[in-house]
Image (tube, grey):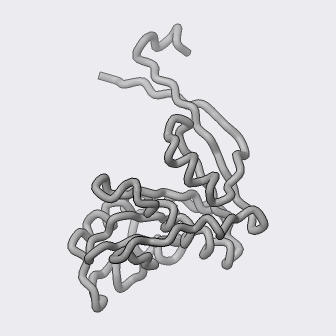
Amino acid sequence: IKNVFGEKLKGYNQRVYEIQKDHYIQKNEPLLKQGYETVKITKSILENNGYITYQNLGFLHTKLLQFWPSFERFLLHGVGYMVVYENEIVSVCFSGVVAGNVHGIDIETLPHHQGKKLAQKGAHAFVQDCLENQITPYWDCMEINETSVSVAEKLGFRNKLNYSWYSVPFE
């Protein structure tokens, strides 16, 4: 491949994780500092007609619509949680892709709230919901993303396989 595309070719190593109910490590679920709350993503939140208004609802909308054609499809087929601080959505964890009963996780924490175990907390809520509903959570991340690898392994995800992928910029 490198002979064809030359120095522009960039390679990446991915890790794929799955978790079974008997491998889930609930005892590693972190406690949130005061003011943080884990909330399930619901229709009333997405439509902004609940009793709480989130100041950055666009963050959640943008993330979901990167993966889903509509909020309705997400609510019908996906699972999702967010961590909120003072009415700001600071971390999200949701089904980014669904194939049968397997749900691929997408997770993101806003930069000014990273390092507080919020991704881990959201992932715990997501995994618990999935396992209670006979859904298999699936975690796929770049090998160099040490934070993602760490969160997955702390929850009990096990490395199922690794693969490489490549990108080539076309200018």
Viewer-proximal residue among 72 and 120: 120
Residue drawn at (40%, 54%) of the image: 115
Viewer-proximal residue among 27 and 68: 27
| Residue projecting furthest to the bottom | 51
Above or below residue 116? Residue 126 is below
Q: Could you say where residue 59 lies in the image, as x and y percent from the top left?
A: 29, 63
Residue drawn at (52%, 41%) of the image: 146
Q: Could you say where residue 104 lies in the image, as x and y percent from the top left?
A: 57, 57
Quadrant location of the N terminus?
top right
| Residue projecting furthest to the right | 22
Number of on-image labels: 0
Quadrant location of the C terminus?
top left
Horizontal side of residue 133 vs 11, given as left or right: right
Residue drawn at (70%, 65%) of the image: 24
Q: Could you say where residue 66 lies in the image, as x and y percent from the top left?
A: 38, 56
Horizontal side of residue 53 vs 101, given as left or right: left
Horizontal side of residue 85 vs 116, given as left or right: left
Indicate the quadrant where residue 92 lies: bottom left
Viewer-proximal residue among 45 and 153: 153
